[in-house]
Amino acid sequence: MIQKIKNKIMARLFDNHTQNIASAAMILGAATLASSLLGVVRQRLLIGQFGVGNSLDAYFAAFQIPNFAYNLLISATLSVAFIPVFCEYLNKDKDEAWRIANSVLNLTAIVMGALAFVFFLGAPYFIKLISPGFIGDKYTLTVNLTRILMLSPLLFSVSSIFSSVLNSFRSFLLVAIAPLLYNLAIILGIIFLAPTFGIYGVVVAVIIGALAHIAIQVPGAMKFGFKWQRIIDLKNAGVREIIKLVLPRILAIDTSPISQMVGTFIGSTLTVGSVAIFNLVYNIESLPVSIFAVSFVVSVFPSLSSALAKQDYDDFKKDFSYTARQIIFFLIPLTILTIVFRAQAIRLIMGTKNLNWEETRLAAGALAIFAVSFIFQGLTPLFSRAFFALKNTTTPLIISLTSILVNVSGTYFFLTLLSGNTLFAEMIRSWLKLSDVADLKVLALPLGFSLSSLFNAGALFAILRSKFNYLDIDTPKIGVAFLKYLGAGLISGVIGYTGLYFIEPHLNERTFLGIFAQLTFATTLALATFTTLALLLKSEEMVSLIGAVKRKLNKSVVVTGTSENTQI
């Protein structure tokens, strides 16, 4: 009996076929949240083990070249080119689909392996370019760590193929678990390897984590029929189509990391601490978008690709509209509540970062400005994936490049407006309650970022509607959902704001527990209000969410009950 239960668990783990987009997004969203929390633990352990000194400087600098190679060539690039073509061939000829998968896997491994070798040899020169201030032992350490870490883009590139295969079959569980294993491996490396081998032990743990990232997904791919073949068929039409789609997509990668680089570059010319405030708040604001938007987009992309491959425009409309409304459903209230609770959130998350009160308020202001663009950041990857499902990578490329220019020019424009006592500066001071803060220039960074996000989403949506007018993306229904949740969100924000000050006299706001209790009380009140209003408005998205939670809970109860009976 016990063995039978183990077999059932392993079958669910390695053959987890998710039909429902909401359930798939819930899996990916929960995994993203868990991985982010593990990331916080990892960072805290790193600082605890090494302090903020030469070792961690070298460690983070050593990641720059591997990350650049992976993000440019693979991340959000290969999967969006691979999945539509792979899904198309799965519907026609499965043997041919697996031949394409093997060719792309082998070709990717060779290309990334060769690139890693080039960077391995050239590490001393590249480190001088990206870290010109490193000299002596610190420079040597960074070169050595970079050379070890050059294995990581090769391993993650291979892993991305298996992730794409599993996503094509709508099997998301193993894909969601992989980043958790990666972070756990690094945490264990810090605990057990670092005391003996120093920072080298952590870097070795990174490579072990990357191997685990691959290993957990391979059995799942094999369950669906994958068998490794020693082939690279460049004459295959499917392989050539993937290569054709990848090349422009390399330049059309997600602009958020580039926008972060723009903010860091410009911030370095401002007052001391501007770069730190921008990057710390950026890391906070990107979490809601990753959990409540990217998870849905990753879940729906295979469905969009499959629907268009079969020319089933009704299914495309249904899945696109559903995903857009889900993103709006989550991100509109999160936008409003983030703006309302910005000070408490910053004090809770960054209160131990030795920020003075003025810096804390500027960080809170930056978070509020970032929050305004949540909905645009969330919808942009959905609109982009719609183009990719249409096998159109040129349009997102042009818009991505243009949005970078909008970010740069917009940031400098806002810098001008925030310099001195201009009308715009006074409006920002009034809105964000920064009347006694003299220098607001750091806020130009999130303002430029948000403007760029608005342009990116708006341009993609406008072109999608005009150029592909045969696609009905259910704009009226999406618009009604937007207005519905905007109204519910605003009322919830007022209730939450009231809750903050209602509970304040009963708590000590100078302590972590006091701020946590205040934020928990007010957030609970606001979310309860939003839930009630959404149900009164007969929200399909709220009903879907509650249904998905109930299904997951019922499955958990069944599994738990079976285990307990077996033990008896």
Image: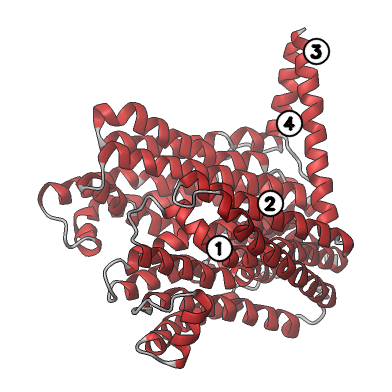
**Three-letter amino acid code at disc 2?**
Thr
Seen as rendered, the residue at the extreme bottom is 423
Q: Residue at x 73, y 37 (%)?
A: 16
Please tell me whether mark 4 or mark 3 is closer to you in this view.
Answer: 3
Q: Let me know if residue 442 appears in the view.
A: yes
Toward the viewer: 254 or 302? 254
Find disc 4 in the rendering and name its residue. 12
Q: Which mark is residue 243?
A: 1
Count the marks.
4
Q: Give me the C-alpha separation between circle 3 and circle 2.
A: 36 Å
Find disc 2 in the rendering and name its residue. 524
Q: Give me the C-alpha separation between circle 1 and circle 4.
A: 34 Å
Q: Give me the C-alpha separation between circle 2 and circle 4.
A: 34 Å
Toward the viewer: 12 or 476? 476
Regarding mark 2 in the picture, which secondary structure is present there? helix
Toward the viewer: 279 or 131? 279
Toward the viewer: 190 or 255? 190
Q: Which mark is residue 565?
A: 3
Left or right, residue 95 beside residue 406: right
Dots 4 and 3: beta carbons under 8 Å?
Answer: no
